[in-house]
Image (spheres, rainbow, N blue to C red):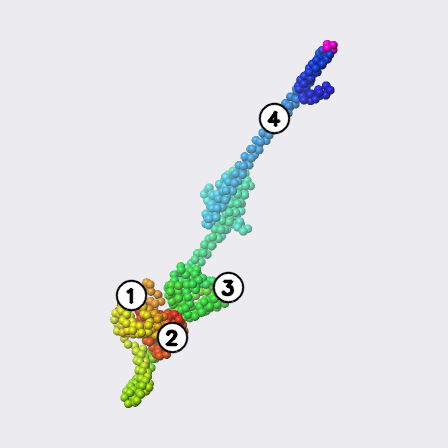
Amino acid sequence: MFCKVFARVESAGPMVGVLSLAALTIVALILALFLAPVELREPAVIAVLSAGVTVMTVVACVMARARERSEESVHTLRTKLNQVQRFTDDLIDHDTLFQNDLIETNTRLNQRVLKLVRLLDVGKRLVSTYNPDTVVQQIVDSVSDIVGYGWAVMEISDPRVGGHPPLKVYESGRSASDANHGQSFEVSVPMEIRGVQIGSLHLVTDRVNTGTPEDTQALSTLATFAAIALDNARLYAALTAVNRDLSALKDYNEDIVESVASGVVVIDASLRVSTWNSSMERISGIQREHALGKHFFGLVEELTDGGLHKQITGALDDGNLREVRNVTLKTVGGSEFIGYIRISTLRSDAGDVNGVILSVEDVTDKVKMGEQLRRAERIRTVGEFAAGMAHEINNPIGIISACAEYLATKIEAEVPDPAKYVRRLRIIEEEASRCSAIVRNLLVFARQSEFKQTRVDLTSLVSDAMLLVSPRAHKERVEVALSLSDTPNVVGDEHQLKQVFLNLFLNALEASSPGSRIEVSTRFVGREEADPAVLRQFAVSGSTDAEGYVEVCVADQGLGIREEDLNRIFNPFFTTKPDGTGLGLAISLSIVEGHGGQIHVDSRPGEGSAFRVRLPVSSPR
């Protein structure tokens, strides 16, 4: 048991084992001494002392053994510490080497990054440079900055990119020389464009064996930059020349388009305007900047059924040339003109129709003059007819009228219940009088008499004429509304003009139903706000110095005029009245045109009619 305890104690460590053993021995001796009987205590003491000696001997042995082991452990530990020290020294040496390698590698990497940054900077500058000499000079000036030594020489032999045979040489850092400059090339790389060499780039230095693969790579990159930049410069120069020629051609074509008297309009397949020349501005009154990009039929409205829209879309479909004659167009500004329009097509490179060209000729004046000539011819014909028949008809009519009056007088005096006979005789008398009036109107219509030129106040004239028809209007329960403003005087024949307005007032009354309303107004329109088409018509009539015009408008709320009749109401003998002669409006138009003026009609069935008489305001002739 003691051995087991000693073994366990010893396993805890030499010094601990010795002390523990001593303690156990002392405890055991003391216990044995106290527990032994009295008679046995002396032998017990002797035994205890003997055991104590033994224990002390064992303790001394153990401590000696422990000292030996401690010395061995210290020696082993020192050996291992020396090994660790040597290993640590080796690690420090390796770390120093690694740090040095890392610094060197980082330095080289920074140098490469710096070269790349400089190369990138050169590339950026070359992108915006289009002069070949400038491109080359920037390249050769950048070589020494990028590689860090030497200078550059560039040789260009291709005349397409700036070279002039047999050779053109660019140098940096030294004065220019010919090809035999006497320096040895440290690094040389070719300059190629699409596989064709156009020259060479050389790095020259006085030092020996200083070139590195990185220098060669940087020089190759610069050579590539130079080749591409030179090619771009060549292409840019060619493109600039082409653009200059195209711009000159465009200006030439625009000058031609602007110089023609006809309006020129180019519209695409979606009918949007891309060209609108100055003549079209003059014809339509629409400025170019307001027309470009707009839908053509959003700018002009076709008032007559000339089929302009159909003809344009047809030309876009089949590509054939077309023309539209005497189509009346109204612009967004409200002006109207009559146009003769020729339609030709625009084609793409593939031959597809992608637009049309409209050549617009304003034929308003020609059409109006043609109408005036035709009207003059009709007047001449009517005049010849009236002059020939006036004598032949007036005499029989006079006899018929006189006989009817005589018979009516005799029957009233001699015949019982004469009313039924007299009524028929009065009809004969009235119709004979009507025939005489027709002949007189024909003579007035046909006669080219001179107007008595005076200064006429149209506002006063209209007011006086309305007084003559007011009783009839009141009788027929038709309201008359006057809106008369102060207007400048016009030059004309007061009697003839009064006849015109009386005729218009009477026509309005005849078209009106009880309870309806007639509106009569006057106003002055200055030249600045006047419709250009109206001024052009004044000029055709001889009033080239018109400062504007006075407009008299007579509007009723009657049945209106059918569209097919609008162009015929001023023709002699055309009438829609059962008892009309068809000469009232014809005579009125003849008088107004004789004064250099116009009559314009706005009417729709069921909405009434508005007759506008426009007379120019100018100095007396």
Whole-number angstrom distance, CA of label 1 to CA of label 2: 32 Å
Mark 1 belongs to which amino acid? Ser
Mark closer to the chain start, 1 or 4: 4
The image shows residue 377 at horizontal and vertical percentages of 35, 77
Mark 1 or mark 4: which is in front?
1
Q: Identify which amino acid the numbered label 3 is placed on.
A: Asp
Q: Residues within 10 Å of mark 3 (few under 14, many from 20)?
A: some
Q: Which residue carries the number 4 mark?
A: 85
Answer with left or right where residue 553 lies relative to residue 12.
Answer: left
Q: Earlier in the sequence, mark 2 or mark 4?
A: 4
Callout 1 secondary element: loop
Q: How far is disc 1 from disc 4 in space, using C-alphas? A: 123 Å
- Label 1: how many Cα within 10 Å (few below 14, some 14–19, many 20+): few
> Element at badge 4?
helix
Chain part drawn in magenta: 38-43
Residue 576 occupies quadrant: bottom left
Q: Please name the residue shown 25% across and 71% down the image.
A: 454
The residue beneath circle 1 is 485
Circle 4 crowding by C-alpha within 10 Å: few under 14, some 14–19, many from 20: few
Q: Position of residue 289 (x, y in %)?
A: 40, 59
Whole-percent x, y for residue 533 in the image: 35, 67
| Residue 69 at least partly seen | no
First in sequence, mark 2 or 3: give its number. Answer: 3
Q: Earlier in the sequence, mark 3 or mark 1?
A: 3
Provide the residue designation for mark 3. 352
Residue designated by label 2: 568
Nearer to us of marks 2 and 3 is 2
Alpha carbon separation for disc pair 3 and 1: 59 Å
